[in-house]
Image (spheres, helix red, strand yellow):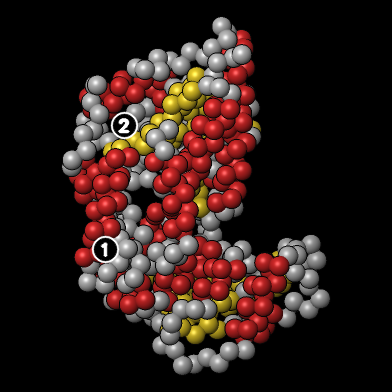
Amino acid sequence: MTSLDLNVAIVGAGPAGIYAGNLLSTAVKEQGGRVAIDLFESLPAPYGLIRYGVAPDHPRIKGIVTSLHEMLDAGVIRFIGNVEVGRDIALDELRDRYDAVIIATGAIRDAALDIPGIDLPGSFGAADFVAWYDGHPDVPRTWDLPEASVAVIGNGNVALDVARVLAKHEPDLRSTEAPDNVLAGLAESSVTDVHVFGRRGPQDIKFTPIELRELGEVRDVDIILHDEDFQYLEGWVAPNNQYKVMLRTLEQWRTREVGQASRRLHLHFYHAPVEVLGSAETGVEAVRFERTVPGADGSVSGTGEFREIAVGQVYRAVGYYGTPVVDAPFDERRGVVPNVEGRVVSADGSPIDGLYATGWIKRGPVGLIGHTKSDALETIGHVVEDALARAGRSTGEIDASGAEQTPNDLFALLNDRGVEFTTWEGWLQLDAHERTLGETHEYTRERVKVVERESQVEISRASVAAPANA
């Protein structure tokens, strides 16, 4: 029987990377083998977009965090944080030290919206705003909200998250883990009207029913819809119960009495953005849209009718763009690592031995957590298949590149370079610190995030001995 012994590096400690490590561990054990997995993360803390990309008022996300925590706490996957591949250690150095390298860096940047004026002062990518209200360590601590009317362009869950946070009153976020600097910024907000624009109609929304329902539960906020956006629904049959629930929710909102709340959230459909109006001196002043109509094939087309809606800020939530790794192939147009079913390929389409991808960096920023699991399953299947093939071609046992030496050699390398890497034990320490801050906070919260990178690293390394050469 072939003995399968593997050392694997995974780049990215979000759900995609953690699921891949967990599935790989199970798959190798089923082959009667052994696997050592190092999970590299550029941030000091794990969980990726679960920690820094989900709105703080989503309590159901805790279940996902619990699951990811259990996978890392099992001890099979070793977390190595505050290490950026391509800066602190090269991709080729990982490939020299490990039998396989899996890229799971996801997508944290905003996709582009190529219209005139999109770069005016007051025009932002939704990802930057999300990173601010989630306490990402690498974004500014402050975010000014001086305008009464703002626009959110997009018809997905991120657009809803951004719109909901913009419309909410600061006291309604005090029970969440939103950092104190975020609460302070929202307390100073001048926003009264949030306009959400979708290029397509209500039948094409990319929300989930839960996200949509949460929008209607925001205190002291009226939701305003427009009858003209629902005229094309006659005769349309919802493809599944999810759409039936969402359309029923929208129809209920259309009949609700409005005008009593201090803030308003406007949902606009069939509005294609064509230009952000304003100047470098005044910033954003309005957005120009073209009204669209649905076609028989499910597409939309312009009507030639243009409207200008006055707003002082614009947030584009039209998708994310993949995060490349230095020296790894990258498709600039699609924002992904080029691959075939998770096997990374070179420019000529041939697989690169030992290099794989999973998650959003593999397939693009679409789908939910469930898709990430099935995605990782496909990639890991090929990792194991290729490892078994290499074993069969050699002596019947994979050379694990010095299984006992690799971890110590890696830590010695990072220490020699002065890289202040963090560990799982360090995360447990930071996690406990944040929970203590929450318990002692004036609002009594589950946790208060430590925002600054330097503080996260200091707390994580304070009393946890970072492995040296032993």
Residue 162 visible in the shown view: yes
Q: Residue at x 47, y 49 (%)?
A: 67
Amino acid at the residue labelled 2: Asp
Side of 310 relative to 467 (left or right): right
Q: Which of the two discs, 2 and 1, labels the residue nearer the N terminus?
A: 2
* Residue 466 location, quadrant: top left
Left or right of 341 on screen, residue 101: left
Q: Residues within 10 Å of mark 1 (few under 14, many from 20)?
A: many
Nearer to us in this view, 110 or 141: 141
**Mark identifier at residue 88:** 2
Who's the residue at 42% across and 67% down the image? 57
- The mark closer to the camera, 2 or 1, is 1
Question: Relative to 363, is 382 above or below?
Answer: above
For badge 1, the amino acid type reads: Gly
- Quarter of the image containing the C terminus? top left
Q: Is residue 371 left or right of residue 106?
A: right
For the residue carrying disc 2, how many other residues have a C-alpha within 10 Å: few (<14), some (14-19), or many (20+)?
some
Residue 122 percent coordinates (x, y): 38, 67
Q: Percent x, y for residue 40? A: 38, 35
Q: Position of residue 21 (x, y in %)?
A: 49, 35
* Residue matched to label 1: 438
Q: Secondary structure at mark 2?
A: loop
Cα–Cα span, label 2 and label 1: 33 Å
Q: Nearer the viewer, residue 299 or 285?
A: 299
Q: Image quarter for residue 394? A: top right
Give the residue at x 61% y 31%.
381
Left or right: where does residue 223 sit relative to residue 92? Answer: right
